[in-house]
Amino acid sequence: MKNQFNSKPTIAAAATALALVLASGTAAAQSAIDLTPITGQFKAEDVIVAVLAVAGVLAAIYATMTAAKMALRWIRGG
């Protein structure tokens, strides 16, 4: 017995998904939330400083782990 792919449920599901996407896009366009009061409070410099601070902390942790591995290798003689 040969299994045949029934495309009707697949097409129906795709059509439903497309309708939901289009409906949500239309609803989002109608509500048009204005985020400028929130986004206007941040400057690019503030964001850059925060990202560099996190990168500095991660670099320090990585350097500490590498130094600890090297020290353990020296102690073990390997």
Image (cartoon, grey):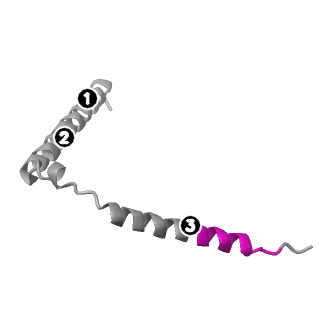
Q: Identify the main secondary structure in magenta.
A: helix
**x and y, in percent, of residue 37 in the image:** 15, 51
Which-is-in-front pick, marks 1 and 2?
2
Amino acid at the residue labelled 1: Ala
The quadrant holding residue 70 is top left
The residue sitting at 73% across, 74% down in the picture is 8
Label 2 and label 3: CA atoms lie apart by: 40 Å
Amino acid at the residue labelled 3: Ala
Judging by the rendered image, the residue that carries numbered circle 1 is 68
Label 1 and label 2: CA atoms lie apart by: 21 Å
The residue sitting at 88% across, 75% down in the picture is 2
From the viewer's side, name the closer residue of 53 and 66: 53
The quadrant holding residue 78 is top left
Marks 1/2 in contact by CB < 8 Å: the verdict is no
Judging by the rendered image, the residue that carries numbered circle 3 is 17
**x and y, in percent, of residue 52 in the image:** 13, 45
Residue 74 vertical placement versus 55 (above, below): above
